[in-house]
Amino acid sequence: MTTPYLTPLSPDQQRAFGVVEPWPLAIADRVRFSELDPLNHVNNVAYLVWFETARVTYFKLVGISSYKDDDNEPRIVIRRGEMDWLQEMRADENYAILSRVVSYRNTSFTMQQEIWADGTKRAAFTCVIVLLQPDGSGRMPIPTYITEHFHTVDGVERRADTA
């Protein structure tokens, strides 16, 4: 199978990376030489860049941001993040980055992300993301069409106060 890079993967393509239960969004890429450290494995910061690439793709697909000069789009801020490096990666490995939202509040949501290669989970990242007003003056409520996506596509349970 030819791996399509930086394009959403189908459930079968996700399974080819070892993912048992496909996620709402997964994109593939490969390790580049520039991402290696002196020990010849992927530098820790590269994982954070990979997760960011997948988050931006997710935000564009869901409609959170188009990343164009639009005075109506929220500012997107990571308030907190937790990273687990589970297994090293090396040059030219193909990998898939999985992304999904697992919970939300009025102005923030929690996103989980994982990197899979050769049938093993290599890294995991969980972050709390806050939406701010376009001018940065305060928090912005998550629009209903986005919370609907969280429910219908990501499988987030409906909150009691929004049912």
Image: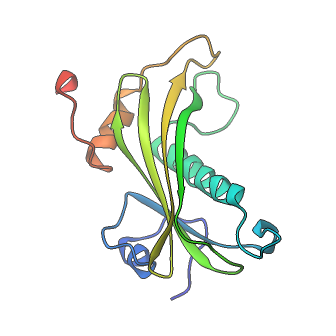
Dividing the picture into quadrants, the one containing residue 107 is top left
Q: Position of residue 139 (x, y in %)?
A: 51, 16
Dividing the picture into quadrants, the one containing residue 146 is top left
Q: Relative to residue 123, is residue 128 depicted above or below?
A: above
Residue at 35% x, 33% y is 104
- Of residues 100 and 57, which is closer to you in this image? 100
Q: How many marks?
A: 0
Q: Position of residue 55 (x, y in %)?
A: 55, 48
Residue at 20% x, 21% y is 161
Horizontal side of 83 relative to 104 (left or right) equals: right
Q: Position of residue 145 (x, y in %)?
A: 36, 33
Horizontal side of 62 relative to 66 (left or right) equals: left
Snapshot colouring: rainbow
- Of residues 40 and 141, which is closer to you in this image? 40
Residue at 55% x, 71% y is 87
Q: Relative to residue 21, is residue 44 depicted above or below?
A: above
Q: Relative to residue 16, is residue 24 depicted above or below?
A: above
Q: Residue furthest bottom?
A: 1
Horizontal side of 151 relative to 76 (left or right) equals: left
Q: Residue furthest top?
A: 137
For the C terminus, give its image quadrant: top left
Horizontal side of 101 relative to 117 (left or right) equals: left
- Of residues 63 and 35, which is closer to you in this image? 35
Q: Position of residue 1 (x, y in %)?
A: 50, 89
